[in-house]
Image (cartoon, grey):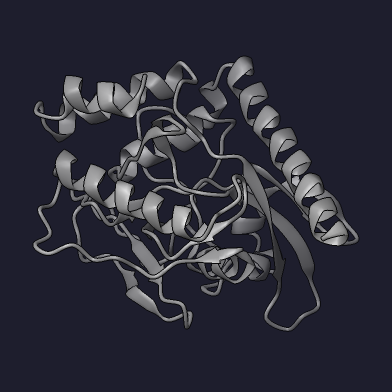
Amino acid sequence: MKASEFILTYGKRGLAAWEAAIALLAKAGQLSIPSLAAVPVKSANGNLTGTVLVTSDYVTVGEPGDQLRIPLTPASAQAVANAYGGALLPTRKLVKDTWQASAYKLEPHPEVPNKGSDMTQYAEHSTFIDSQLSAKLAESGELVSGIKKDVVVSNIYKPGKVVIYGWLKPDGSPVQPLSNVHGDFYVDYSHGVRLVAPTMTIDGQGEVLTENVYKDPVLSSLVSDEGSIRTTRYPTTTSPSNVAPQKLMSFKGLLVQGLQALVYYAGRKRTA
């Protein structure tokens, strides 16, 4: 479904209707999930290093030329992650590491007034981001940061709340400090959903489950600046264990696409 069709069909029906539609698209594997990009990570003491794969941009509805970066409540964001191979939402540290690794660190663009859950404002903001990327002649598949506040997992999470962080400026400082002030029903144009691949690599140890790293008292220093993450997923009606095998394969396919893109662009840069 193109973004223009999605907006025309669901835009005036309200948050509950369009998030229900997103859930159906996610279950069918029909959301536009950006290709994956590598983010180097290391522990605070430097003793551990590794690589996490994240989506190069935020989850969208539509297709290139007619797409919408879709803000979601935490339950819907988690449902999307669960539907794509049991992916995760990022931590504060991963948001910062992703920004550091990004080829394009764009200037945040606040809109005034903030209209909350307003599809028209969602679309306006996403279109503005597209214009920023066009002005930079951005390459598809390369990491982009500075365009959204991330829905994150954090140890300041409380039931009934959403935790957000980010919208990092070009100097690396956040417009949005880590916050759990909003209820889990709240979402606005500035929020974005970036997915973290369900597996990552730790140098010297190989491939491991990212969620296990989130929880581990030692390894979590690779991905968290808050210690081990106590709640790694927001409550939702779906769980990674219930994901159909074809959805797991869809995320593996994205992994292959992302790695192919990395090899391609690395080769271009070496020959430039």
**What residue is shown at x 60% (from left), y 71% (from top)?**
100
On screen, residue 214 versus residue 260, left or right, reads left
**What residue is shown at x 39% (from left), y 21% (from top)?**
25
Which image quarter holds the C terminus?
A: bottom right
Question: Visible in this render: residue 264?
Answer: yes
> Residue 180, position in %: x, y?
27, 65
- Answer above or below: position of 56 versus 46: above
| Foreground pick, 181 / 128 | 128
> Residue 191, position in %: x, y?
31, 54
On screen, residue 43 versus residue 152, left or right, reads right
- Answer above or below: position of 158 versus 264: below
Quadrant of res 4: top left
Query: How many numbered marks appear?
Result: 0
- Answer above or below: position of 77 versus 268: above
> Residue 265, position in %: x, y?
76, 51
Which image quarter holds the N terminus?
A: top left
- Answer above or below: position of 153 versus 23: below
Quadrant of res 204: bottom right
| Residue at the right extreme, as displayed | 204
**What residue is shown at x 32% (from left), y 75% (from top)?**
175
> Residue 249, position in %: x, y?
67, 22
Quadrant of res 106: bottom left
**What residue is shown at x 54% (from left), y 30% (from top)?**
84
Question: Visible in this render: residue 211?
Answer: no
On screen, residue 3 versus residue 139, left or right, reads left
